[in-house]
Amino acid sequence: MTVDLQSTNGCENAPLVFIGGGNMAAALIRGCENKNFITKDKIVISVQSEKSANKWRDQGFQNVFTDTLEMLLKFPTAIYVICVKPQVFEEVVSSWPTNARPKFIISVMAGVPLNMLSAKLPFVSGNTTIIRLMPSVASSIGESASSMCYERIEKIENQECHVAYARRFAECVGTVEVIPERCFNAAMSIGGSSPAWTFMYIESLADGAVAQGLGRAEAKRIAAQAVLGAAQMLLDGNSGFEIESQHFGLLKDKVCSPGGTTIEGVRTLEKNGFRSAVIEAVVAASQKADAMAKALSK
């Protein structure tokens, strides 16, 4: 499927500059290619080493740089996608040119709020749209549950077009929810961090089955498919479940026969604090992102 760019006011003709060429950038670029969102000649990438640069060049990307300053000087009015670790953000931007005038900026960094991005980026003025985007590891297969936020500023020309472009960009690797920034870390926790916790849950399901005599390979396949199927039932309207208005517990109750094996498992999970552990994991991850932002602001 080709992504419709009719509402992005010419942004589709601008180079897409990735500052950082790691795993997340690779997933986003792959998604853009798969959806025919942008061509390779419009993609620009900065990396840390010549070895990494050559890996990209071997895939047909020619606009690859090991010097970020050189890249930004060559592409001063492109769309910038910041894909570096938040811990090195200030170091990375310290030498950027002040005369750069990007169309807008997409930040793919945890724990770096919009006001900090605006303050730390040397070329940003009140006329530059900054958008925060947080995809997940599932971006690599086009199944990310991404979150996006931005500050609406009336005086910014074409801001709605910038946001439309960023949304379509995010949809190249899955779904995206546009939310207020005050909720961003909570959304990032369930969208970005939960795959790791879900892997733990699936691993635990498989371990339990192995403990009861099932082979490891079979246990892993069954556990993974069971979780995938459960998620699809929540999202697929053909299951009869309305995710906007109905409680998840409705489907759980349908599976739990009176006096049966499933309700016995539910009882055991409740006894061992399953729900509480998951809730606390989300809260802890969200609070960690808050703490990261405070540490970076010092």
Image: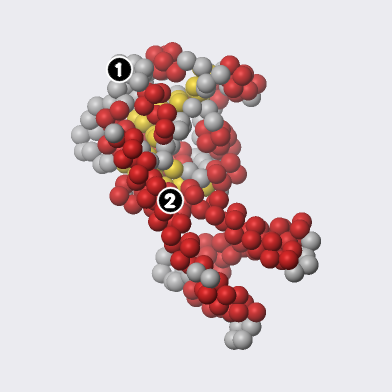
The amino acid type of the residue labelled 1 equals Thr
Q: Which residue is mark 2?
A: 285
Residue 59 screen position, x and y as percent: 64, 24
- What is the count of numbered marks? 2
Residue nearest the observer in this picture, 88 or 179:
88
Residue drawn 51% across the image and 67% down it:
274
Q: CA distance from mark 1 to mark 2?
A: 34 Å
Residue drawn at (69%, 61%) of the image: 206
Kind of residue at disc 2: Ala
Classify 193 as above or below 10: below
As drawn, is 35 to the left or to the right of 106?
right
Is residue 224 at all visible to an observer of this figure? yes
Residue 228 in view in this figure: no
> Is residue 143 positioned above or below 248 on the image?
above
Q: Please report the residue visible at 56 percent of the width from the left and 34 percent of the height from the top.
A: 23
Image position of 19 (left or right of 49): left
- Residue 98: mark in rendering: 1
Residue 129: % across, % down: 30, 33
> Along the polypeptide, which appears first: circle 1 or circle 2?
1
Please provide percent x and percent y for residue 236: 54, 63
Q: In this orientation, which residue lies closer to the viewer: 112 or 106?
A: 112
Q: Quadrant of residue 11?
A: top left
Question: Quick one: SS at disc 1?
Answer: loop
Residue at the spot x=27%, y=41% of the render? 151
As drawn, the residue found furthest toward the left would be 155
